[in-house]
Image (cartoon, grey):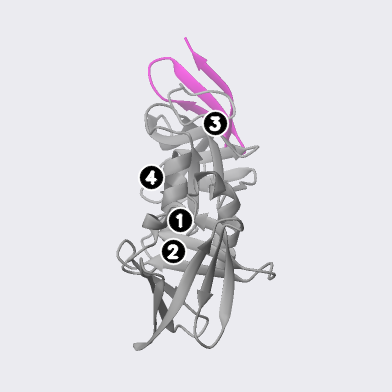
């Protein structure tokens, strides 16, 4: 989780509050979950007291905000730690231990994040700030649609996965019969399968959304397997009539010629 958050924080920094806005963290239960899944809870009191609970065992320390360093100095009785501001919001504080490049304290506000999943909270925040819509891919990944309002064509919408560009290819989204062709990390076209009756039986043409059949579209037929399962195969080469004066010629599963006259 820390690796993901560390990669996300640079993209969120412009939305960070400052530690000098102490009302953000005063009198709230902030929880760190360590590598052993132990919970450490910190409550910063207005009078400078620091209530520390480690799996229910409580100690009272002290805290101080150092404005010139944008840092919190906390006295845990056994030691003193200087924590520099990295990212601050009402739900999550990411503070860097002074002098340690990768030593981050990730504190979740237990009131706002009962499950203490700081990564999920920050990802949701990032999506809201960047106007990103997400779709579940059949591979298990989340596809990020950047600046898409959910209305109209998806064509030319920039896509990413965890903020990274998506390789060229065809993506399949859960609960969506369409397939999305990605090129240069943008949706190049959306493919929709339409079923037609032809002189050679039923065929399925995968064509671009909102467009008529065109050269290069893929043509399939349905086949029933030995166990009764249905599978898709490329349509055999040939000439198919799919309606009054509508003919298409298929070779290697692709339309090489389409005529309507």
Q: Which residue is mark 4?
A: 176
- Secondary structure beneath dot 4 equals loop
The residue lying at 39 percent from left, 43 percent from top is: 177
- Looking at the image, do the residues carrying marks 2 and 1 touch, with CB atoms under 8 Å apart? yes
Secondary structure under tag 1 reads helix
Residue annotated with mark 2? 118
Q: Residues within 10 Å of mark 4 (few under 14, many from 20)?
A: few
Crowding at mark 2 (Cα within 10 Å: few <14, some 14-19, many 20+)? many
Q: Mark 3 to mark 1: distance in Å?
A: 41 Å
103 in relation to 156, above or below: below
Residue 30 colored in magenta in the image: no
Task: Check contact, mark 2 vs mark 4: CB within 8 A.
Answer: no
User: In front: mark 3 or mark 2?
Assistant: 2
Camera-nearest label, 1 or 4: 1
Q: Secondary structure at mark 3?
A: loop
Q: What residue did someone put label 3 on?
A: 217
Region of the chain picked out in magenta, as a range: 235-261
Q: Nearer the viewer, residue 164 or 102?
A: 102
């Amino acid at each position: 989780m820390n690796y993901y958050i560390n990669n996300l924080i640079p993209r969120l920094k412009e939305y960070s509050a400052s530690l000098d806005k102490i009302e953000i963290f005063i009198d709230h239960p902030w929880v760190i979950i360590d590598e052993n899944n132990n919970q450490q809870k910190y409550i910063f009191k207005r009078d400078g007291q620091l209530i520390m609970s480690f799996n229910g065992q409580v100690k009272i320390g002290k805290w101080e905000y150092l404005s010139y360093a944008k840092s919190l100095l906390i006295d845990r009785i056994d030691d003193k730690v200087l924590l520099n501001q990295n990212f601050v919001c009402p739900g999550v504080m990411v503070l860097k231990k002074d002098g340690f490049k990768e030593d981050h304290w990730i504190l979740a506000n237990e009131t706002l994040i009962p499950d203490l999943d700081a990564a999920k909270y920050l990802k949701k925040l990032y999506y809201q700030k960047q106007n990103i819509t997400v779709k579940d891919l059949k591979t298990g990944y989340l596809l990020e649609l950047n600046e898409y309002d959910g209305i109209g064509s998806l064509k030319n919408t920039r896509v990413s996965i965890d903020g990274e560009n998506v390789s060229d290819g065809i993506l399949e989204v859960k609960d969506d019969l369409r397939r999305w062709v990605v090129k240069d990390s943008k949706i190049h076209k959306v493919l929709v399968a339409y079923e037609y009756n032809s002189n050679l039986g039923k065929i399925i043409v995968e064509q671009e959304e909102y467009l008529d059949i065109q050269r290069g579209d893929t043509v399939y037929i349905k086949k029933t397997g030995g166990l009764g399962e249905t599978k898709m195969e490329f349509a055999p080469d040939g000439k198919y009539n799919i309606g009054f004066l509508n003919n298409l010629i298929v070779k290697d599963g692709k339309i090489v010629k389409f005529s309507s006259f």
